[in-house]
Amino acid sequence: MTADVQVQEEVVRRVMSMTQIDRDGLRDAYSEVRDDKTEISWAVLKYEGSQVMVAAKGEAFEDFKSQFSEDERAFAYIRLQTGDEMSKRSKFLLVTWVGLGVSPIKKAMMSTDKALVKEILANFSVELTLESMEELDIEVFRQELVKAGGANYGTGIRE
């Protein structure tokens, strides 16, 4: 086998092993999370082999937290309500999860894979990259969304 043939085979192997995205599944989950009329407030996307797919959707933050482990990679899209007594609004957060036990090669692939995911999960106010269970904190998420929202003029009194 010549060197050129080996190089071509390597290129084909790499292209075939690149991450695939379940675009239809992600679009559906994205729409559900964005829709204020649904109870679904989060979606978690995980790898099945080399494909990123919707692994879970739900309402409760405790259920959301249980979706992550130290030895895996994932993405999440979350809707949280922010605002003050005069104006409530939904804001969206994109989370990239890379557990502490993930290999360096898989960690490195996350930036490319995230670009593919962001083609579909395009609208969000805050993007966070997390690696430990302690970082999965709804109040921290809410604070980050409030900071990203700019001025916060609430008085605490609604007449």
Image (tube, rainbow, N blue to C red):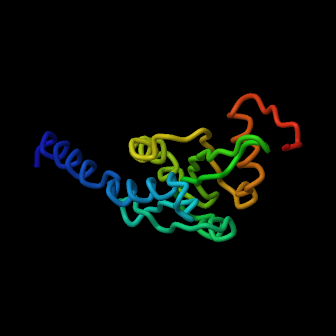
The image shows residue 149, relative to residue 50, as above or below, that is above
The percent position of residue 112, horizontal first and vertical second, equals 42, 42
Observer-nearest residue: 35 or 13? 35
Image quadrant of residue 127? top right
The image shows residue 61, relative to residue 75, as above or below, that is below
Image quadrant of residue 148? top right
Q: Residue at x 58, y 65 (%)?
A: 71
Looking at the rendered image, the quarter that the C terminus falls into is top right
The percent position of residue 154, horizontal first and vertical second, equals 83, 37
Number of callouts:
0
Observer-nearest residue: 78 or 38? 38
The percent position of residue 32, horizontal first and vertical second, equals 47, 58
Observer-nearest residue: 137 or 12? 137
The image shows residue 95, relative to residue 64, as above or below, that is above
The percent position of residue 110, horizontal first and vertical second, equals 48, 47
Residue lying at the far top of the rendered structure:
151
Q: Is residue 127 left or right of residue 144?
A: left
Residue lying at the far front of the rendered structure:
159
Q: Residue at x 39, y 58 (%)?
A: 28
Q: Is residue 154 left or right of residue 136?
A: right
Q: Residue at x 53, y 50 (%)?
A: 104
Q: Residue at x 48, y 53 (%)?
A: 106
